[in-house]
Image (tube, grey):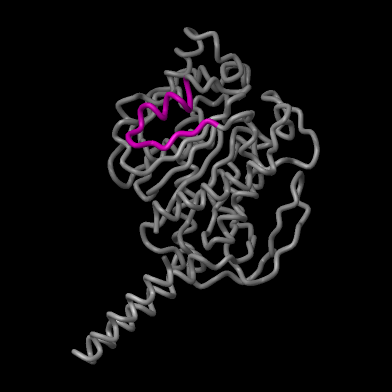
Amino acid sequence: MTNSTASITVHHQRTAQRADPARALWRRVLGATALLAVSFSAQAFQAGLRQITVPGADPIPVALFYPTQAPARPVQMALWAPEVALGAPAEARFKGLILLSHGTGGSELGHHTLATRLAAQGYLVAALRHPHDDWQDRQLVGSGRYFGERARQASRVLDAVLADPQWGPRVPEGHIGALGHSAGGYTVMALAAGQVQPARAGQHCREDADDPMFCRLGNGALASAPGAQAVAPVAEGASSVGDPRVRAVVAMAPVGVVFEAAALQQVKVPVRLYTAQHDQVLNSRYHGDWLARQVPGAQAFTVAGAGHFAFMSKPQRSVPSDAGDPAADPEGFDREAFQKTLADEVVGFFDRSLN
């Protein structure tokens, strides 16, 4: 197929050259530009890593994974050892920017396998640590501001990265995607949907008894959100859960019960949704599966044999938590093999959707 296409292209160029030298020159320029684009998309870089902090009343730590020519090596960082080139020079141009949002009580490094693969394929990945909903501090869970604030934190990171003179000019306009897991899956869906109803979580937990882990997390504070009101888009320039800069979304085992069907049915960007067959944290009936039925054109997949944490990079030791152990998998599930497949699929999705 490739050789045949190339021969046809050469034949057409030669015919044009005989008829019109100026046109032939222009075709060669266009051909060279196309070849450069193909070369960039096909080239595998290494993953660089730098850490920045978005300033504000609640500073946001962000891990930036990006394409580099420098050699990467495993670097021990807390529970993980991502393969990165620390502080290495970045490529002059990126394919796009991918925002990465972790689950409740998580870390900016918890999905480093996906982040480094995206970086090696030409993307800048901005993985934030959600203030007051990370492994050190979960005050946000009981604040009554959980759902709106998480999405606004994500938008603050986009603001900062795009405004940064070192990083922003390297991101092609309109080439922004978002990737999230669990509460992070909710977060990136909120950026696309623009409207959530936190009170729906409390209603759900009063009426449906078969989603106990979601309703128990944080002693029920996350689900009940006392006094929380609907968070809706407001006038342009003001704070909102929606972010029109996000042009494609991947949500993995996402929280979904706080969305209304009407808001999800207005989502216009490509969406890819994953659920886990043996999700012990979220009943997919009310979350990922329900989202998939509401979002027009959503690509939805259930991962056979997987538990809730299959979408995270595997920690190097057991980490007991209210939601279970992120290092544990259901018997017979090969997380390492799945992560490779998942990375291929996520890269392919963003390549098709953003480039």
Could you say which is closer to the camera, residue 329 or residue 233? 329
Could you say which is closer to the camera, residue 207 or residue 143? 207
Q: Residue at x 37, y 70 (%)?
A: 5
Could you say which is closer to the camera, residue 344 or residue 258? 344
Q: Residue at x 64, y 60 (%)?
A: 49
Residue 202 location (% of width, % of height):
48, 15
Q: Quadrant of residue 131?
A: top right
Q: Is residue 20 magenta?
A: no
Q: Which region is colored magenta?
A: 286-302
Q: In this rendering, would 330 be left or right of 31?
A: right
Look at the picture and state if 117 lies above or below 101: below
Q: Residue at x 41, y 30 (%)?
A: 292
Look at the picture and state if 294 lies above or below 74: above
Quadrant occupied by the C terminus: bottom left
Quadrant occupied by the N terminus: bottom left
Q: Is residue 293 magenta?
A: yes
Q: Residue at x 49, y 18 (%)?
A: 226
